[in-house]
Image (cartoon, coloured by chain):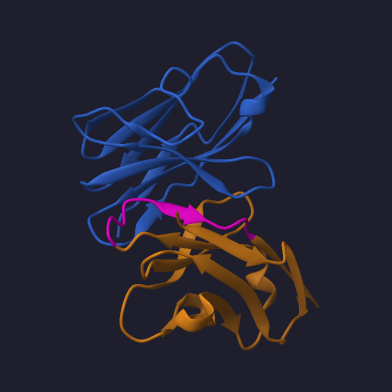
Amino acid sequence: AQSVTQLGSHVSVSEGALVLLRCNYSSSVPPYLFWYVQYPNQGLQLLLKYTTGATLVKGINGFEAEFKKSETSFHLTKPSAHMSDAAEYFCAVSDRRSASKIIFGSGTRLSIRP
Amino acid sequence: SAVISQKPSRDICQRGTSLTIQCQVDSQVTMMFWYRQQPGQSLTLIATANQGSEATYESGFVIDKFPISRPNLTFSTLTVSNMSPEDSSIYLCSARQGGDEQYFGPGTRLTVT
């Protein structure tokens, strides 16, 4: 069975600082990996995804993530935080074979200090 | 990409009643999904809505409580039946067009009193 673990339910960084949100997955086969963002009172928006190929994936709003098979990780980073980045971030995994459903992590709330 | 709308966006319902949530996609999609997001928590998959067949429910969710319809390739409904305060959640619809990406609707915020 697949699962996703997000370390840290709440992360707070200063504006302009590095953002690092951690995600580890468990899967018996190489999975598809996703990061979604949810702004207050809104639905989910895809930030980026890894399916195959280059392990460093660039997404929207300056975010990127690196798939590290040896560490079973897919951490999300952004070099310089902006106030508008404050939101809930979800790491998710999908079975590469069926790709039929997405399993979400518990989420990490990102706060930005002025 | 697919654009997904949901109706209603929010509702306040009395316990014991039922609410049907509609999900409309602006293009034909192969698979549609219904998720529940309880306050302050992550998303939990309720079921996969299959066009022309019965929905496939995840463990802990049953058809009598959450009946789903999928009459065509662009539309689905989820009914929350015999509601209790524990059903207060955000219900999200999502769709997959055949690739690996899922698109999400804005959600329906349900409060049961």
- The image quadrant that residue B73 belongs to is top left
Residue found 35% across the figure and 59% down from its top: A95
Q: Residue furthest front?
A: A28
Where does the N terminus of chain A fall, quadrant-wise? bottom left
User: Residue A73, image x and y in percent?
Assistant: 53, 76
Name the magenta segment's main secondary structure.
loop
- The image quadrant that residue A11 belongs to is bottom right
Viewer-closest of A13 and A27: A27
User: Residue B67, image x and y in percent?
Assistant: 40, 22
Residue found 56% across the figure and 12% down from its top: B17
User: Residue A29, image x and y in percent?
Assistant: 36, 67
Q: Is residue A16 left or right of residue B48?
A: right
The answer to whether residue A41 of the structure is visible from this angle is yes
Compared with residue A31, is residue B95 higher up or lower down, i.e. above or below? Answer: above
**Apparent colour of chain B:** blue
Does the stretch in magenta take in B97?
Answer: no
User: Residue A88, image x and y in percent?
Assistant: 63, 61
Q: Is residue B37 left or right of residue B61?
A: right
Residue found 44% across the figure and 82% down from its top: A58
The answer to whether residue A81 of the structure is visible from this angle is no
Q: What is the letter of the orange chain?
A: A
Q: Residue furthest top?
A: B16
The magenta segment is A97-107
Q: Is residue B7 left or right of residue A39?
A: left
Where does the C terminus of chain A fall, quadrant-wise? bottom right
